[in-house]
Image (cartoon, grey):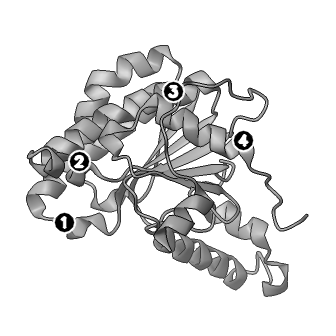
Amino acid sequence: MLQRLRALFGKASVKPLQMLDTDNIPQHIAIIMDGNGRWAKSRGLPRMAGHHSGMKAVKRITMAADRLGVKYLTLYAFSTENWKRPKAEVEFLMKLPQEFLASELKDLMEKRVQIRMMGYKGDLPDHTLKAVEDAIAKTANNDGIVLTFALNYGSRKEMIEAVRSIGQDVQDGKLSPGQIEESHMQQYLLTADVPDPDLLIRTSGELRLSNFMLWQLAYSEMWFTDVYWPEFTEEHFNEAVREYQRRARRYGGL
């Protein structure tokens, strides 16, 4: 079954770089960055070393996406369920945004990258939130690729909050139940001003969505690879886009 699923969704194979169709580049790519801990374990390193190496891959793939002309790149950095991990690991992960932005923001600014966050700020440590909000403010007027970090994000929570907001509008008389359509739901999601992902990439061989953008991924193409996130290269990224370009997107039609 696993082999059949991979055959359906696509499996990474690093090939010589082939010409991509520049008229068919995904506008929005979302990535579940998975496998940092297993990458580290396979090398006899602590899990924290894997997370640190994974941080370096963020810049590498952001630059690769920018070179291809991708408009939006959304990275699943920390889920609402990741708080269940050991305290020391969570504390380390909460320091990474500060370290990443301190070392890479200058280069991202030069590339006109606009940084955003998608998630719930309430539970984040002050130092994490300050680093992210400072970067958001500094890059707000940039007109390049939009790099969104899904940080303390969970899709079920997002949808529950959206339903609550719609329910409040009904209660306040702004909306009747019969008027509710997909567009209303979309307006209350954290991605209200962003198009749905055209392509989802997940690294490390796992074949699940892990509570990531469940509404927005309804018609996204999906591509899975056994490659761990810290070793995910521009060649792997381009291979995912090549596979995307081989597919016909019908959205339920013929």
Who comes first in sequence, dot 1 or dot 4? 1
Residue 51: x %, y % from top left: 22, 45
- Quarter of the rendering containing residue 58: top left
Question: Gap between marks 1 and 4, in whole Å?
Answer: 37 Å
Question: Gap between marks 1 and 2, in whole Å?
Answer: 17 Å
Q: Residue at x 22, y 70 (%)?
A: 84
Q: Nearer the viewer, mark 1 or mark 4?
A: 4
Which of the labelled discs sits on residue 245, or is there none? 4
Who comes first in sequence, dot 4 or dot 2? 2
Q: Residue at x 63, y 61 (%)?
A: 216
Who comes first in sequence, dot 3 or dot 2? 2
Give the position of the C terminus as an image quadrant: bottom right
Question: Gap between marks 4 and 3, in whole Å?
Answer: 17 Å
Q: Are marks 4 and 3 in contact (CB under 8 Å)?
A: no
Q: Which residue is mark 1?
A: 85
Q: Which one is nearer the viewer's eye here, 55 or 113? A: 55
Relative height, residue 189 to residue 37 (above, below):
below
**Along the horizontal axis of the image, is 248 left or right of 71?**
right
**Label 4: few (<14), some (14–19) or many (≥20) C-alpha neighbours in 10 Å:** some
Relative height, residue 8 to residue 48 (above, below):
below
Q: Residue at x 36, y 23 (%)?
A: 105
Q: Which residue is mark 2?
A: 39
Residue 123: x %, y % from top left: 28, 61
Question: Gap between marks 3 and 2, in whole Å?
Answer: 22 Å
* Residue 142 seen: no
Query: Among all residues in the image, which is located at the extreme top?
Result: 110
Amino acid type at mark 2 = Trp
Amino acid type at mark 1 = Arg
Who comes first in sequence, dot 1 or dot 2? 2
